[in-house]
Image: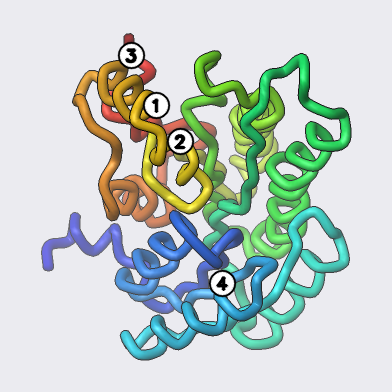
Amino acid sequence: MTAAAERFGLGGQVAVVTGASAGLGVQFAHALGSAGAAVVVAARRADRLESLSKDLEDAGVECLAVACDVSRAEDVDRLVAETQGRFGRIDVLVNNAGITEVVPAEEESLATFQNVVAVNLTGLFLCAQRVGRVMLEAGRGSVVNVGSILGLVGSGQVPQASYAASKGGVVNLTRELAAQWARRGVRVNAIAPGWFESEMTAEKWNDAGNQKWMRTRTPMGRPGRPGELDGALLFLASEASAFVTGQILAVDGGWTIV
């Protein structure tokens, strides 16, 4: 392996992934593990975490599963405590937990809006703050927030006001945390995925009209494929991006350029 390639490695490091019970979270956990990290997987669905943990351990990845609702401060504090108790450090945080509600803005209830923001934005802040304290004390660390193209541009045709608002908040929270922590050794960046098929987007992908719209609107003419976020994740998590902070990396087939 060349010196340049080694900079993407995470050997000896500990990575925490929230929202790890399905979809992109599962993919992220495997990608980090394959790069050499011990992986802590967190989500609300404990049964799925146990299955993922077994898969990771079967692949030779040291793993810890922690049931956690990121919108609950006590759950996040327990996640941090259990991670430190097991590994004594946290080097990478992937803030991936998220939910959505597809409904016209004029019909979306206040309770629904608040719930989406509580998970996608407030929960992300809680995790970044609590893990950030550990990283700041150590003088090192990388936080990778999972945003969305809908934090950069509007959609309209797939109405998700609460989701778009929360992801827009993630974008500028990423910049603010990066600015506050840059001189203290902690980098904060974000990935903004385009259209990737997952459990959360299943409803959209089951609709032929939505599929045609997404493919027509995307310059590359297709959705993202499994694994196509791995490179961006490992770049931002590792020393390969040692001089990068406060950046939003869109992985979207060109969606946001037109």
Mark 2 vs mark 3, CA separation in Å: 22 Å
Residue type at mark 1: give it. Answer: Asn
Q: Quick one: SS at disc 4?
A: strand
Q: Mark 3 points at which residue?
A: 257
State which tag comes first along the sequence, 2 or 3. Answer: 2
Q: Mark 1 points at which residue?
A: 210
Location of residue 210 with respect to 79 vertically, above or below: above
Query: Marks 3 and 2: in contact by CB < 8 Å?
Result: no
Checking the image for residue 41, the label placed there is 4
Q: Which of 245 and 97 is in front in this view?
A: 97
Q: Distance between the residues labelled 1 and 3?
A: 20 Å
Pick the front one: 78 or 182: 78
Quick check: 134 above or below 169? below
Calculate the distance from the C-alpha at mark 4 to the C-alpha at mark 3. Answer: 33 Å
Separation (CA) of disc 1 from disc 2: 6 Å
Q: Name the residue under label 2.
A: 204
Under mark 2, the amino acid is Lys
Name the mark nearer the viewer: 1 or 3.
1
Say whether residue 140 is left or right of residue 258.
right
Of callouts 4 and 2, which one flags the residue occurring earlier in the amino acid sequence?
4
Residue 194 can be seen in this image: no
* Label located before the other in sequence (1 or 3): 1
Gap in angstroms between the C-alphas marked 1 and 4: 32 Å
